[in-house]
Image: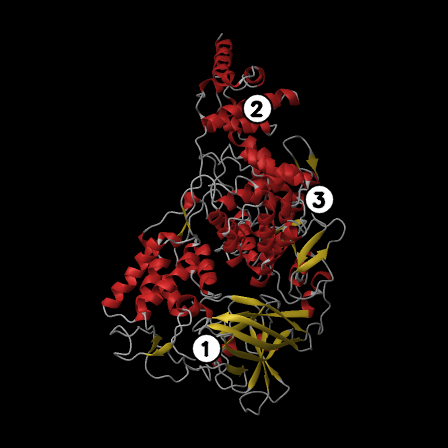
Amino acid sequence: MQYRIGRWVLMILCAMILCPFAQAQPTAFLQKHCSICHDARERKGGLDLTAVKANDFARWVKVHDRIEAGEMPPRKKPSAEETAEALKSLRLHIVKLEPVRETGLRRLTRVEFEHTIRDLLDLPGIPLQAELPADGSAHGFDNNSDALDISHVNLAKYIEAADRTLDMAIATQPKPPSVVKQRISLANPHGFVAHVLLHGDGVLLKNKQPDPEFPPAGEHMHLDQGAHERLGSFRNGSSVGLFRHEDESFHPYFIEFVTIYPGAYRIKTSLWSFQWDKGKVLPARGAEAVRLSIVTLTGDGRGGGHPSTVLGYYDAPANQEKVHDFVTWLNKNEIIGFNTASLASGAQTRGKYRAMGFTGPGIACDYLDIEGPLHEVWPPQSHRALFGDLPIVEFKQGDQPGTRAPKRRPVRQEMGAGKNRPDATTGVWTVHSARPLVDADRLLAAFLPRAFRRPVGPATRKLYLAKVDERLKAGDCFESAMRWAYRAALCSPDFLYHVEPAGKLDDHALACRLSYFFWRSMPDAKLTELANGGRLRDANILRAQSERLLHDPRSQRFVEDFLGQWLKLRLIAATDPDRKLYPEFSPYLQDSMVAETRAYFREMIAKDLGAEHLIKSDFAMLNERLAVHYGIPGVRGSQIRRVALPVGSPRGPFLTQASILKITANGTTTSPVPRGAFVMDRLLGQPPEPPPPNIPAIEPDVRGAKTIREQLDKHRSHPSCASCHAKMDPPGFALEAFDVIGGQRARYRSIGVGDPAPRGAIDPFIGISFKLGPAVDASGQLPDGRTFKDIAEFQDLLAAERGRLLKNLARQFATYGVGRSLSFGDRANIDAMVTAAQKSGGGVRTLIHELVQSPLFSAR
């Protein structure tokens, strides 16, 4: 009797909900297909439809999504027509329940803040985001309005950032600093410092001048930890540096040059390597790796609490000099250092001489030339953006309004800075204006619309002009008074926030949405011109501008920021692989992983590849280090390039890239659960429910006694866990074919039980202490009953779901592009975008264009 009453209650409830929206079929659908499991008596999955209120928006969305995904009903499937009618009525009801959603007021993220300052004042290398508080995250992205709160800490840091920006932007002398050309080598007195800290770390020195302390010309000396203890941190004035070992504990750097003036510098260096194949029979996997070595140039190679920024990786061919020449931005107090990259990490030698007896490969640096700072014009563009062509004169009392000279931070002569010292100047120099308020009004009229990214009326400009007048009357000179106004502008809500009208965006708001989507920065002159003319809404112009922005180098910011959050690349260094289990891991390998993912996404956009390439591909974006790691022969050098894959290789797509596989592991072991959850959430757009609070996590078994599949069995058999694990575990099981650092494997590594691993299987110069444990089982069964025996078969099954993959990618683009979570009502726009993209081939670039053209993108 209770069962019958429950079913009648469900029918009445469904009728109350759905009858006003037409069809009777949904009531019959729920009564026929759902009530048997989800009434007050059965409550399967914790769902009692008789208890769901008519206005329970979230619950009805879940019911809709489970039916739409084909997960419910699980037994006897209704016809497609019956399901479509039920879903249609459910959608009508849910849309009516949902409140209208608009993008909330959003401030700039710290990434956007830094890029906007750089583009506004032409300061391409100013570092600001690391000094600002970390942004929150909502719905997967930090530019979401739900995550961008503000506090007094933010405000204080914005003031500091504005002061730092103006310090760097404003010229403090009428003539540019002299361009210094300086050659730095180990032959220069005090030119090189190295700290040798670990066994196996060797510094190889080749003498070029007679020196009784070192071997004669042409002979070599290796320094190990014992030598370090005898010599300490050494300085040698008569040697060219040759280095062994890429471990992070070895940090050579050139101390003779210290940047005093920030700006562009030309760097030229000569690199080569030696002794790659001497006396070694190399395994197939490592043959390519030991024929080329790389040197990492950093903006600050001192280590020990000093931040370092990698400038790039540079080839050092065996027994052949290679000259590298490039221009980069250096900030004050930065020096140039480098470390080895492709040499084996963890290599050691045994016996009496230890590292001094090492005869393996090494890297040589003959010299490093630095030229700069390089300025195309003076005053620089940053200064001209603030003061135009007003003259810079020596400050003298009575010559101009104001009794107080501008404050200048003293330029300090750095120890060992060599020729790169400040130019001799006397007195204090400042910007001069004969008509201060007239010039101030003119300068603000040019600056404020660019800073605020839209037209600025006279009333707003007069507020800032009044601040200038106030400071002049208080005794400040013209430059200092203008600085007050500029700092106020850079800390104002008009600069710090995306100002968008409610409803449909105007042209300037649309220009901002476009530029911050592709560049993470302000609109350029072309976008501003189109917005001023009211022409940006033209579909052809909007498409052309999207293409232009995508082709611009600044679109790399979109690639890095979007992937950093969608695929969690920002977490690549969150775990350190166990050195005993994965001795081949290195910072160079990790940087190559990230470079692969970014380059692959860029290639997908450039070639307009379909969403199936997220899962399966016939090419990969590789350099030599990654190719060796993946077991793909024939790739040379440090540069990432497109490489055709051998038939049957699972490599290439995001699914099997080492970056994703490392991010979804804990540094010691892998688990199908986080990897499966990542695939469900990030690639398929179906995040699993959080685990029940009373279910303990699985502890990794590094001894190799049990496989992770065996450990998971107790979770999969638990009633509260079974349904989620049925969806989550299959992709995770398939990815068990790859280890913690993305290497393909047939057996697990362990530090306890197992067979000895063959020496030289990784690198002939790396000692191996791990063992080979149980065999990997990468087979599984999907929730719909389809099975796969390995990663390749799983890729075939998942890649076939192109529509599902494309729809999730559309959601990710849209959430990131509009800065808010998507509502249920937005699904119609997403479906329209996906349908249009599929008609044009289903490419990623096409999908981006469909988003930009959609009503979703052009409305708040």
Q: Is residue 119 above or below residue 417?
A: above
The mark lying in front, picked from 1 and 3, is: 1
Residue pointed to by mark 3: 792
Residue pointed to by mark 2: 88
For the residues marked 2 and 1, what is the alpha-carbon distance in whole angstroms? 68 Å
Among all residues in the image, which is located at the extreme top? 1
First of labels 1, 3 by sequence position: 1
Disc 3 residue type?
Ala
Quarter assignment of residue 447: bottom left
Residue pointed to by mark 1: 258
Residue sitting nearer the eye, 189 or 525: 525
Per the image, label 3 sits on a secondary structure element best described as: helix
Can you see residue 619?
Answer: yes
Q: Position of residue 216 (x, y in %)?
A: 61, 89
The mark lying in front, picked from 2 and 3, is: 2
Q: Position of residue 419 (x, y in %)?
A: 46, 84
Q: Is residue 606 above or below residue 50?
A: below
First of labels 2, 1 by sequence position: 2
For the residues marked 2 and 3, what is the alpha-carbon distance in whole angstroms? 37 Å
For the residues marked 1 and 3, what is the alpha-carbon distance in whole angstroms? 52 Å
Figure disc tally = 3
Q: Residue at x 48, y 51 (%)?
A: 512
